[in-house]
Image (cartoon, rainbow, N blue to C red):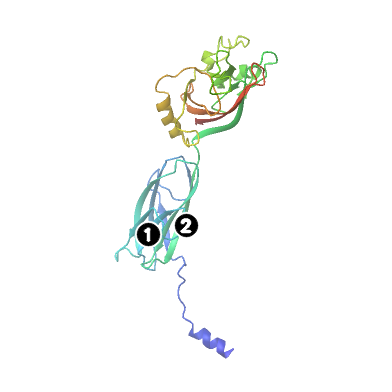
Amino acid sequence: MAVALLITSCQKKTSPVDGSNATIELANLGAKYVTGDITLNPKDSIYLSFSVTSPRDMRYVSVQKNPVNQTAFLVRDTLTAANKNSYSTVKKFMADSANGSSIYRIVAHDAIGNYIGNKDIKVTITPDFMYYTYRFLYVPDTTAKTNTSFMSATTGEMFSYTTGAANSAKIDFGIMFDTTGAKTPSTTDDLKFSLYSLSAAQGQIPFYDLGTWTKNATIMKKGTAPTFASILSAGSLRSAAVTNLASGTTNKVTQLVANNLVFFKTSTGKTGCLQVNFVNDAGTFKESYINVDVKIEK
């Protein structure tokens, strides 16, 4: 016991190097200033107005994003003797274009890199576009008329002839088996699947009477770029529309096969892209369909 007391009395008490000694406060100076965890749209502005105070001398104040170590930072300010214990600044960033969450860390270090303190802010990016996957567009059937041959790109809903009449104002396009398609030596598909706007529907499918339906005028065009996977925001959809829909648009695209992209703009001005995932060509039988994914701005 005497030995233990002697050892204890000889120990020197020091502040741990990883102790949090800094106080970090965020100020709200306007609409774009962030003071805590927040949800934003892609590419929104992130303004940080913050003050850092510490009884321990600070040398560096940094902002890190998704920090994995003490040296990776978006910005780092070097302090002087005048502001080593109290420092204020404003930093401005742009949010990611892809949805998801990130941590923005305001952190202080001393002259040799020891941690003094930090404050974390979670920024969550929500998509500003809708993404509908694994939608089946079947060719129109003549008897029961229950095949889902119509789609609302805005809501992702699928409609048959029997359910579409009451929902025609929602419908942006339909599918048909177009007998004007022709085989080519490069594919085994008949290339007879066509996507059409309801504004072009009358006369296209004579056994469907669309006389009383709302006929939204969707314009469309097949394209190859950008890739469907690279479209990660409403901004990229609009940019793709500017490029692909600048000329040569139509109310009907023909000869659809797997991996085709169709860029479109709805009657309400929403831009989008449809990707054909695969086709089931059963000829004129009602089992024929295309499977699609659709992205459209909110």
Q: Nearer the viewer, residue 102 or 52?
A: 102
**Disc on the earlier residue, 1 or 2:** 1
Q: Amino acid at mark 1?
A: Val
Q: Residue at x 42, y 65 (%)?
A: 116
- Residue at 40 percent across and 61 percent down: it is 108
- Residue 53 seen anywhere in this rendered image of the structure: yes
Label 1 – label 2 distance at C-alpha: 17 Å
Q: Nearer the viewer, residue 282 or 294?
A: 282
Q: Which residue is disc 2 drawn over? A: 68
Q: Position of residue 61 (x, y in %)?
A: 37, 59
Query: On the rendered image, what quadrant is the N terminus found in?
Result: bottom right
Query: In the displayed structure, does residue 248 sit left or right of residue 100?
Result: left
Element at badge 1? Answer: strand
- On residue 61, the disc is 1
Q: Is residue 102 above or below residue 248?
A: below
Which label is found at residue 267? none
Task: Tally the numbered discs.
Answer: 2
Q: Is residue 290 left or right of residue 34?
A: right
Callout 2 crowding tier (Cα within 10 Å): few <14, some 14–19, many ≥20: few
- Find residue 261 and report its horizontal and vertical position in percent: 50, 27
Find residue 76 and report its image quarter.
bottom left
Element under label 2?
A: loop
**Residue nearer the viewer, 223 or 51:** 223
Q: Above or below — where is 140 with respect to 85? A: above
Residue 156 visible to an observer of this rendering: no
**Residue 197 place in picture, x, y as percent:** 52, 18
Q: Residues within 10 Å of mark 1 (few under 14, many from 20)?
A: many
In which image quadrant can residue 52 be found?
bottom left
- Taking the view exactly as shown, the residue that stands out farthest to the bottom is 2
Which of the two marks, 1 or 2, is nearer to us in this view?
A: 2
- The residue under label 2 is which amino acid type? Val
